[in-house]
Each structure stands twice: as structure tokens, then as C-alpha cells.
Amino acid sequence: MAVTTTQRPLVRAAGLVKEFRRVKRITGRLGALRTFVGRDYDVIRAVDDVSFDIAGGELVGYLGPNGAGKSTTIKMLTGILTPTAGTVSIAGHDPSRERKANALNIGVVFGQRSQLWWDLPLRESFRAVRDLYGVPQREGDRRQGELVELLDMDEFLDAPVRQLSLGQRMRGDLAAAMLHQPRLLYLDEPTVGLDVVAKQRIREFVAHANAERGTTVVLTTHDLEDVEQLCRRIVLIDHGRVLYDGALTELMARYAPYRDLVVTLAEPADVDVRGAEQVARDGLVVTLRFRSDQVRAPEIIAAVTSVHAVVDLSVVEPRLEAVIGRIYTQRGLPENPA
Ligand SMILES: Nc1ncnc2c1ncn2[C@@H]1O[C@H](COP(=O)(O)OP(=O)(O)OP(=O)(O)O)[C@@H](O)[C@H]1O
Ligand SMILES: [Mg+2]
């Protein structure tokens, strides 16, 4: 007999709003003697009617400029903050009301702030987390062993957290967040301040957790390489509102449907061919931009080489950075594609 079930998303945010009241500073006549006056507040709407669903197994990039409301959203999803309006449901639980039940399902890493015990050796922090979640001894040893190997933490397991480098500390935080094997992992800037190798290690770990364990990941980052490598779907927010929610490839196809052909000429010249526009010239190197949805690279290449002696050439894909940068500066999605 066929059983029909309504597949509930793992994460459901519906009409989420978070307002903060901030005491107004009175300057005016008081000049340098700034003071506070009670009950005089500014209301800041950090998150303004945000809705999205995330299915189990997804790896979603939650992106936006500084102050967009990303961390505030994550804090509502984890239950640290209670929404001013709207609802959050994580595997059927309201995180701010059912904090304990919710805690079993989630792991959280805030790159800017460690969750580890500062004065304890990393090993002891892991022990404390395991006890907190009631992970059985042998199973805990097994999981910890696996995490220590995956994140290459053997060398600094016995050092107090305050002595760890940022990269080591971040690995420690990630491992601590995974020890109870949460279904859902929130990562708020897990690569901030890390060198290229350390960033890559974190990315590989996150990709592994998602692919091998099926861990659902919500990732906030300003490093677009994190996004390009990890996220199929992105949710872009600004001023607390969702600007875009969809596939990364779709965003690129819609807002950057072009390629650049970079040619090095034998003789300096401007290049004028049909279907492409010269957008830069630096010595012998000329950059031609063409609509990749209208014309193919070989046609442009043929047109150029039939007129000019070409020493070298390459076709360059648009960078996510350029598209996202444009969205941030325009404070919205561009009306027209590039
Ligand atoms: N506890 C608070 N009290 C008052 N205002 C706050 C508080 N937390 C955040 N805000 C404000 O809410 C807005 C959104 O902040 P949030 O930290 O969510 O941004 P963000 O997208 O995470 O930015 P960033 O990329 O810089 O981390 C900002 O204007 C911030 O100043
Ligand atoms: Mg933030």
C-alpha cells in the first residue's frame, strides 16, 4: 500500500523579523559630553520578513554584505535569539522554545567567536561536549578519532584553546560542533581570517560532511571561493530582505551571461569584431567580451585570428565576485544583465 507523507523541510523560516532597539545617542547641545536618555530608542529591523525552506542534505550559502542580517538570522535559526515576528521550525521544533530538543539536531560554529573552553586543552573541550550530549564512551572515541584525523588535529589536542592559532581553533570548533553528529550544521564565517591552505581544509571537511554524512549545511561567508566550491544554492540578503534564492548557476546565467576572450596580439592594435566588444587593452593584451548565450567562443576566435596575428589567447569565465559585487553596490539585483 502506498503511503503518502508530506515531506517537511528540515529548516523552515516563515516571515522572520528581528528588531533591535538601540538607545539613541543625544549629541546636540551636549557636545562632547554625550549621554544616554532613557526610553529614547531607534528601532533597527535587522531581519525583515525572511522566508525560506531548506531540505535535508542541502548545502546553502547564506550571503549578504556586512550588516545585512545574516548572523541575526542564524541566531534565530539556532534559538539564540527569539524572532520579533515570524516562525522558525527545525525538524519540527521551535528552536527558541525547545532549545534542548533542537540542540540535538544542530551544530553551530561562529568563526568570530569560539564556543570552546578557553583555558581547557582542546581534548577536554571535546570531553565536555561529549558529556553534554551524552555520547557513549566508545562511540565518542570513534567519532573524535575520525574528526581528529579528518581535521589533522593530533598535534595540538593537548594545548589549551587560548594557545591555538586561529586555523587550529577553527578546526577545533568544527570538530566540537560535529561530535554529537547533528543533522544540521550552521557555519557563520568559518573561514574568516584563515590562510589559503586552512580555508581549503575547512571546505573539504564541510564538503565531506555534506556528501558522506548527509549533513545539511547553512553557510555564511564573505569568501566567494567558499561559495563557488561548496554551494549549489544561495540565499542572498540585504537590509534584512531576501534578494535572491536559487541556484548559483542560475544567478550567473542570469546576471553574467558573458565570457571574456583575452588575446595577446603580435602587434598592438584595437580589435573590432562582430559579436564582441573590446573592454580592455593593455599593451599587446586585448580583452573582448561576448554574450555566451548568443555566440560561441570559436566564432569570436576565428574572427580575431582572421584579422590579427595572435600569440596567445584564453577564454575567461565571469567571476561570482563581479556579480555579487554589483548586487551589493546597487543594493539590489541588476535590472539588466551585464
Ligand atoms: N544585539 C544587537 N543589538 C542591536 N543591533 C544589532 C544587534 N545585533 C545586530 N544588530 C544590527 O543588526 C544588523 C544586522 O546585523 P548582523 O550581525 O545580522 O549582520 P551580518 O549580515 O551578520 O553582517 P556581517 O557580514 O558584518 O557579519 C546590523 O545593523 C547590526 O548593527
Ligand atoms: Mg555576521
Image (tube, rainbow, N blue to C red):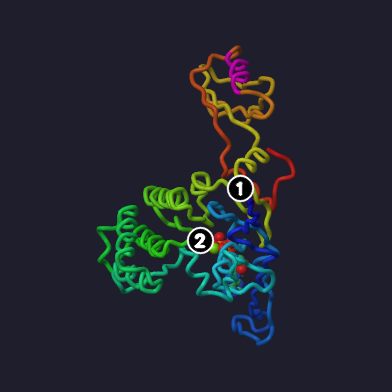
Question: Which is more N-terminal, label 2 or label 1?
Answer: 2
Boundaries of the magenta span: 297-305
**Left or right: 178 with respect to 332?**
left
Q: Which residue is mark 1?
A: 324
- Disc 1, ligand 1: is the CB inside 8 Å? no
Q: Residue at x 68, y 40 (%)?
A: 254
Extreme-front residue of the structure = 1
Mark 2 — residue? 186
Image quarter (top left, top right, bottom left or bottom right) of the C terminus: top right
Give the farthest residue toward the right: 335
Vertical arrangement, residue 282 with respect to residue 177, above or below: above
What is the x, y in percent for residue 289? 63, 29
In the rendered view, tell whether residue 100 sits above or below residue 330: below
Above or below, 15 against 40 in this view is above
| Image quarter of residue 55 | bottom right
> Which quarter of the picture shows residue 89?
bottom right
Front residue of 223 and 100: 100
- Marks 1 and 2, how far apart at CA: 22 Å
For residue 304: magenta? yes
Q: Crowding near pointer 2: few (<14 within 10 Å), some, many (20+)?
A: many
Report x, y in % for residue 271: 62, 21
Q: Left or right: where does residue 196 sit relative to residue 264?
A: left
Say what secondary structure mark 2 lies in: strand
Disc 1 residue crowd, few under 14, some 14–19, many 20+, Cα 10 Å: many
> Where residue 9 appears, x then y in whole percent?
61, 58
Say what amino acid the circle numbered 2 marks: Tyr
Tell me the chief SS of the magenta region: helix
Q: Residue furthest top?
A: 306
Residue at the spot 59% in from the left edge and 48% down from the top edge: 233
Q: Is residue 188 visible?
A: no
Residue 244 visible within the image: yes
